[in-house]
Image: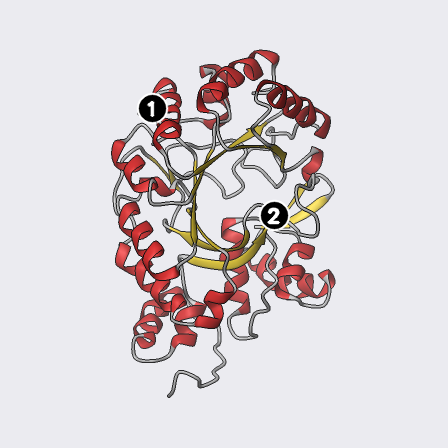
Amino acid sequence: MTANTSITLPRFPGRYVRSLLSFAAEGIPEIYQIFMKHIFGPVISRRLGHSLGIDLLADKICNLNCIYCEVGPTVKLTCERDFYVDPELIIAEIRQFCENPDSLKQVDVVTVTASGEPTLHSSLEQILAFLKEVTGKKVVVLTNGTTLSDQDVRRALRLADLVIPSLDSVLPRSFKKLNRPANCLDLNEIVEGIISFSREYPGELWLEILFVLGINDSEEDLQALLAVLLQILPDRIQLNTVARPPLEKYALPVSLETLKTVAELFSRAMPTVPVDILAGSGGAVEPVDSGQEEEMSLVSCPESGVLEKIVSMLKRRPCTAADINRIFQFGGSDKVEQYLEPLVRSGELELRSHGDKYYYH
């Protein structure tokens, strides 16, 4: 069978996936791409353009168990850096994707992320170096910012063009209630690590802050955050709130008015630092750039493997039927609902309400 042979695949039980991947090495790239575990997209991001995602972890391995997390509960709460996933498997998927020039042309940036915390992967530096070598694209890393006190992590991240850490609170009470850290984390070390990184990192540093109603939105929280932000002086600040079904139902969004007030406070103190509002009350997006939806793919997918692609995407980010329709171009949200109904009935997917919307997860 040649590389251009068109094939249609049934759904396979998980135990057959490894065998199918071995077949890919023998010249069946269609099978390989359908079952890629660590590459997703490209998607359209308001912030980054056409972004190809690289997920470094197979499970949610993290040093936080944030109440607002849309991925689900942390399955391994740890501060230990380890392989977790064989880096050669990730590199093989990256190489496979880059062998298709047409696919690579659709990518503006490569975004390294994870179902948990990507910097816990001990081969981060190796993977970033490979991405810079083979893609020729801008490389972005999304991190919760908790490991930047580690010199090895900071050295690895110097290979990235843009790093976007999170810092939701600098007060111990709010930090513990909101982010629920592993016992091995120290908030002062986290803050000092981000400050140190900001002073030595040659690339762009954007800082994301997510607010939850009644937890980290007090005047005391804001003033403490501002004092730290003045030491970090990131290239950009991005304000967010709960916009999709959170891990804990009591994690409620702040209002758009609150986010605007916070943006004004930070802008007055740091007039040279742009402040973006990513989401408002109930998940409504406050536009930063016009004409684009947040992280919505415009790439049409072949019929073969669509279901697997949808399920893989939903593991990383809950989406509405309308979101899925924009990505996979079904021709309407009602068709998406019909297509996914068997998966909801079987329990493979869950349909959860948040605000006035329903999200598949």
Residue at which label 1 appears? 183
Q: Position of residue 256 (x, y in %)?
A: 71, 30
Q: Residue 218, located in which quarter of the rendered image?
A: top right
Q: Is residue 153 left or right of residue 53?
A: left
Residue 164 as seen in the image, left or right of residue 342: left
Residue 360 as seen in the image, left or right of residue 69:
right
Q: CA distance from mark 2 to mark 1?
A: 35 Å
- Identity, as a three-letter code, of the amino acid under mark 2: Arg
Q: Which mark is residue 46?
A: 2
Q: Is residue 35 above or below residue 317?
A: below
Q: For the residue marked with disc 1, what is the amino acid?
A: Asn
Task: Say which residue appears at 35% left-offset and 25% top-offset.
Answer: 196
Picture layout, residue 67 above or below residue 20: above
Give the percent coordinates (x, y) of residue 317: 54, 48
Residue at figure coordinates x 67%, y 68% from the top left: 330
Q: Earlier in the sequence, mark 2 or mark 1?
A: 2
Residue that appears at 67% across and 39% down: 283
Residue 102: give its label.
none
**Outermost residue to the front:** 272
Indicate whether 57 appears above or below 222.
below
**Residue 281 or 245: which is nearer the viewer?**
281
Q: Position of residue 147 (x, y in %)?
A: 34, 32
The furthest residue to the bottom: 1
Could you say whether the residue bearing mark 1 is in a helix, strand or loop?
A: loop
Quadrant hosting residue 251? top right
Q: Considering the numbered disc 2 on the image, is that residue within a helix, a strand or a loop?
A: loop
Q: Is residue 90 above or below residue 211?
A: below
Query: Callout 1 environment at 10 Å: few (<14), some (14 to 19), or many (20+)?
Result: few
